[in-house]
Amino acid sequence: MQRSKTDNTNLAAKLELRRHFLRKYHCTGRTEVLDCCQGDGRIWSVLGAEFNCGYWGVDIKPRKGRLKLDSVRILQQPGWPQTVIDIDTYGSPWKHWAAMLPNVVRPVTVFLTIEATMFSGAVDRWALSAMGLRLSRLRLPPTICGKLTDFSLRYCLALCYNRGIDIVEAAQMDCPGNARYIGVRLVPQSGVTKAHGPGDDHWVDGSHL
Ligand SMILES: C[S@@+](CC[C@H](N)C(=O)[O-])C[C@H]1O[C@@H](n2cnc3c(N)ncnc32)[C@H](O)[C@@H]1O
């Protein structure tokens, strides 16, 4: 049975993940948020009432009262001032991630949603291609997809090291339906004393949040 796409499956988990990072890294002063996938704007309408945030949201789909824009194009330009980047796509966040990395010039918190389609017979093609696997029609059993997706997730996150950016914390919420919600705190290397990457003890799952 195919899951229908809903904008906010597991809203509670998405909120909890964001609260964890906002409390830890954004508790003083005002934080500017770039919502790259505004959808119904539910996440930040809740968090905006709890935290001191400025907010700019865009979406690629047109809707009255909303700015229609491909947010990859924002992130690939230098100079965006926000320190929270929310990439809550239906599918793959990696195009956004790769576009953003060259322009991370200060500590930022990034939220990524990786949706279930990638776990049910198809692995994210952007991630495969980044790993040098250019297979045009790859259909794999779900168990292999799961492992490959795990690996590709760590591989894609680690692309930040090529840009001189460290991961000081990465956390994941696992939810029913296999969607993964990930939060990452990034700091350009000149700004940290000790780096931690996915795979070590700073890579935590939702039970630690
Ligand atoms: C899961 S929904 C977002 C839900 C939203 N975060 C909320 O709080 O209600 C995913 C949204 O991302 C949008 N989207 C996907 N890729 C995008 C892109 N490259 N630029 C802008 N919006 C995008 C989709 O149109 C869709 O509305």
Image: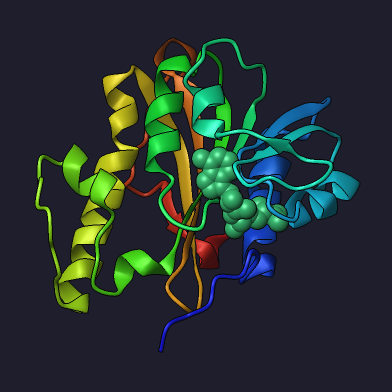
Instruction: Report x, y in % for residue 81.
Output: 66, 16
Q: Residue 14 is drawn in which quadrant?
A: bottom right
- Quick check: can you spot residue 62? yes
Res. 194 in view: no
Above or below residue 203? Residue 146 is below
Viewer-side residue, 168 vs 85: 85
Give residue 91's quadrant in the image. bottom left
Question: What residue appears at the point 21 percent right and 68 percent down from the top-left corner?
Answer: 145
Viewer-closest of 183 and 88: 88
| Residue 90 sits above or below residue 120 on the image | above
Residue positioned 78% across, 35% down in the render? 27
- Left or right of 192? Residue 132 is left
Q: What x and y, as percent, mark residue 148?
A: 19, 60
Residue found at the far bottom of this picture: 1
Residue 13 sits above or below residue 172 on the image: below
Q: Position of residue 87 (x, y in %)?
A: 55, 44
In the image, what residue occupies the spot 34% across and 28% down?
160
Q: Nearer the viewer, residue 155 or 127?
A: 127
Figure check: 125 above or below 138:
above
Q: How many marks?
A: 0
| Residue under the point 40% across and 16% down | 189
Q: Position of residue 53 (x, y in %)?
A: 82, 34
Q: Is residue 141 left or right of residue 200?
A: left
Q: Quadrant of the N terminus?
A: bottom left
Q: Split into 4 quadrants, where in the image is the C terminus?
A: bottom right
Instruction: Indicate how the structure is coloured in the image.
Output: rainbow
Q: Nearer the viewer, residue 58 or 115?
A: 58
